[in-house]
Amino acid sequence: MKKGKLYISIIPRQCSVVRVTMMKTALLISLFAVATLAAAATRLAEHEAVFKQWIKDHDKHYINIEEYNYRFRVFVANARYVEAENAIPEHTWKLGLNAFADLTDAEFRDLYLMKNANLTTRRQPPRPAVAGEAAVFLPRLTNVDWRTSGCVGAIKNQSTCGACYAFGAVAAVEFGHCRAGHPLVALSEQHSVDC
């Protein structure tokens, strides 16, 4: 009978130790979950403050609260991507939140990229400037930041006009004119398109 009593008294004690351990584990998991949610809510509030300032800076307007909430979610996803990329120490560049930060990649492609462009064609090797003349290749510069030259104009937004060729050509002419020793001038893409 003593064995039976001993056996009966050990089982409840082991069960209570297991219950206490399980309760401690559940409490720790709950505390971790609450701390994680609090940190996420704080981070979301920080993103919303940045988003509201970004809306003001880029003069954005949304038609209703659903559109606002959707654009905010897209903005947060893009902001997290920017933060993750900028945290990579090997990068020699930094990303930022521009006027398109409330668009998904698909929306940006649909709105701003050429839909009929055949981007899969291979580029041909450069041809000589004059027929029969051998092409002259300059040594490749490995590290040049042309922004410091004073010959790079301001960033321009072509929006959806479809005249990217004019923006590229005008920027090249502005740069070449400045590199030739003249002051940097801003030329008109519209004049190029009108011609």
Image (cartoon, rainbow, N blue to C red):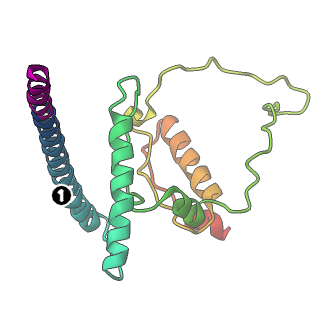
Q: How far across and down, in percent of the image, does residue 155 sit?
A: 43, 52
Q: Secondary structure at mark 1?
A: helix
Which region is colored magenta? 1-15
Q: How many marks?
A: 1
Say which quarter of the image contains residue 6.
Answer: top left
Task: Judge whether residue 6 is colored magenta.
Answer: yes
Above or below, 88 relative to 183: above
Above or below, 187 relative to 63: above
Q: How far across and down, in percent of the image, does residue 51 sit?
A: 26, 61
Main secondary-structure element of the magenta-colored stretch: helix
Say which quarter of the image contains residue 76.
Answer: bottom left
Observer-nearest of 176 and 23? 23
In the picture, measured across the screen, residue 135 lies left or right of residue 40, that is right
Residue depicted at x 45% and y 51%: 185
Q: Amino acid at mark 1?
A: Ala
Observer-nearest of 59 and 179? 59
- Let me know if residue 97 appears in the view: no
**Placement of the N terminus among the 4 image quadrants:** top left
- Let me know if residue 134 appears in the view: yes
Residue density around tag 1, few if under 14, some if 14–19, many if 20 or more, within 10 Å: few
